[in-house]
Amino acid sequence: MKKSIWLATTALVAMSMVAAPAVAGRSKADQRDAEIADLKARLEKLEQESAAAKAEAEDAAIVTGSRLKQIEDTQNAVQWSFADGRPSVRSGDGRFELAFRGRVQLDWASFMQDQNDFGAGYGTVGTCAATNALCDLGSGTVFRRVRFGVEGKVFRDFIYELRFDFGGSDVEGAGIINIARIGYTGVPGLRIHAGAIQPVVTMYDATSSAELTTMERPQVITTLVGAFGGDNGRVGLEATYQKEGLLYPEDNFVISGALTGDRVATNRAAGDRDENTQLLGRLAYRFFSDGVSNAQIGMSAAQLQSGRGAAAASNRTIRLRERPEIRVTGERFIDTGDINIEPDQGAMAYGFEFGANWQNLYLAGEWYKFDIDRLNSSADPEFSGWYVEGEWIITGENKRYAAAATNNNIAVFRGPSIAAPWSPGGGIGAWSLHGRYSTLDLNWNSGVAGAATPANGVRGGQETHTILGVTWYMNANMKMMAEYNMVDVERLNSAGASLDADFNILQGRMMFTF
C-alpha cells in the first residue's frame, strides 16, 4: 500500500515536471497573440479615426466653399425693381445701386390782356401792343422741364446723381447739366455733396419740381436762388446734417450750408477770370408730428461773397428781376437793372419759413429780404417779398412730410400718396384745390409818379400774384394742373411814367415723372 502510494506520487510529480514547460509555452504564445490583436485593434481604430477626420475635413471644405460661393453669388446678384415706375438696379449685398430718373412737364398758357390796363410808359394807352411786347404776351405751350438722369450709390457710403434738362422757355431750352454731384454719407446724419449741385435753401426751392403745390415757385423764391447762387447746376460744395428725434421722438432737425460759384452753363466775359461766389444755408425744425399731421419752422440766408461784372474789369453788379409765375414766356415786368455793388460781400438775403399740414389741409408761407451794399455809397437799397399758400385735398389724402433725402428735397412737404389711382372704371386718383398770394417789391426810394427817379432810387416795380387752381393727382407718376393767375404790376419808369399792368393768365400743366 505504501509502495503504491509512493509510486503514484512519483508518477504525478514526473508528469507535472514534464507538463509544466508545455503549459508555460502556451501562456506566452497566447499573450503575444493578445498583444498583436490589441495592436491591430488600435491600428484599425486610428485608421478609422483618420478616415473620419478626413471625411469631416472634406465635408467642412465643401460647406465652406458652398458658403463662399453663396456670398459671391449674392454680391454679384443683380436685383431689378420698378417702384412707382422708376427702373432701379442694385447689387445683392446692397453696396451698389443705380436708378433711372425722368421728368416731363408740358405747360400751356393763355394770356388775357386788355390794352387799356397798361400804363403810358409802355406806349400809347390802348395801342401799346404795337410798340411793347409786354402788352401782347404770346400764348402757347412750352416743355417746362424735360429731364433725364441717373442716381445711386457706390461702396455703400458714396452717393451720386447726374441729371440733364432740355426744357425751358425761349432760349433756355438748349440742354444743360442740371445736376452732376457726388456725395459721402458714411457718417450717420451727415451728408457732403460736391460738383454741380442744387443747394438746400428756402423751403419751396428745396421742394422737388414734381411736388410743388402750384405750377411755379413764388417769385421771391426764384429771385433769391437765382441771384444768390441757390439754383441748380451750381459748381459748389455742401454739407448737410439731419436728425429725427433730436429733442423728442417726433421732431426733425436739419441744418445745411453750401459754397457755390457760377452755373455750369455760365459764359464769362473775355478776360474776366473771376466768378460769383456765394455762401448759403438753411435751418429747419419740425416741432410737431403725429405721423400724419406736421408743423415746421425754419430760416434761410445767402451772402454774395464776391460778384462779377458784365465785362472784364467792370464794376461788380447784381440784378433782381422776375417773370410772371409762368414760363411759357420769358418776359419780365419787374427789374432793378444792374446795381453796382461792393466786390466783396456786396449783397445778402435772409428770411423765414413756416409749413404745416393738418390731415388733408396744408398751409405754408415764406418771407425774405434783400440787402444790397451799393458801391461807394451809403444809399444801400433794400427789397423784400413773401407768399402764403394753401391746399385742400378734397379726396382725403394728406401731404407727406419728407424728413430726410439724399438730394436737396429735405424737410419739405410732398404730394399725397394716392389711395385710389385713376384707371378707367376704377379709382379717381386724388383731387385738390389750391391757392397762393405772393408779392415781390423791387422798389426802393422810387419817388412819385410824374417825376424822375430820385438820386440812388430804384424803380424795379412791385408784382403781385393771386393764383387759384385745381390739381388732379392721377397716380404716382402723373398729374394735371389748371390755374387762374391774376397779375398786378405797379411800376414807374425813369421819367415817372406808369409801367403799371393788370392782366390774367389761364395756365396748366401735364406732368409725367419716374
Image: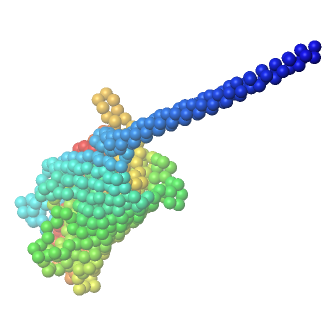
- In the rendered image, residue 8, in percent from the top left (x then y), is placed at 85, 17
* Residue at horizontal 40 percent and vertical 52 percent from the top: 402
How many badges with numbers are in the image? 0
357 left or right of 339 in image: right
Q: Nearer the viewer, residue 2 or 187?
A: 2
Q: Nearer the viewer, residue 457 or 68?
A: 68
- In the rendered image, residue 248, in percent from the top left (x then y), is placed at 54, 57
- In the picture, the quarter occupied by the N terminus is top right
Single out the residue that lies furthest toward the left.
Answer: 130
- In the rendered image, residue 151, in percent from the top left (x then y), is placed at 28, 51
Among the 4 quarters of the image, the one containing residue 218: bottom left
- In the picture, the quarter occupied by the C terminus is top left
The answer to whether any part of residue 265 appears in the image is yes
Among the 4 quarters of the image, the one containing residue 203: bottom left
* Residue at horizontal 20 percent and vertical 53 percent from the top: 164
- In the rendered image, residue 3, in percent from the top left (x then y), is placed at 91, 16
* Residue at horizontal 24 percent and vertical 65 percent from the top: 235
* Residue at horizontal 14 percent and vertical 79 percent from the top: 314
Q: How is the image coloured?
A: rainbow
Q: Is 108 above or below relative to 341? A: above
Single out the residue that lies furthest toward the right.
Answer: 1
Q: Is 215 above or below relative to 82? A: below
The answer to whether any part of residue 386 appears in the image is no
Among the 4 quarters of the image, the one containing residue 176: bottom left
Q: Is 21 above or below relative to 7? A: below
Q: Nearer the viewer, residue 53 or 482?
A: 53
Q: Nearer the viewer, residue 387 or 288?
A: 288
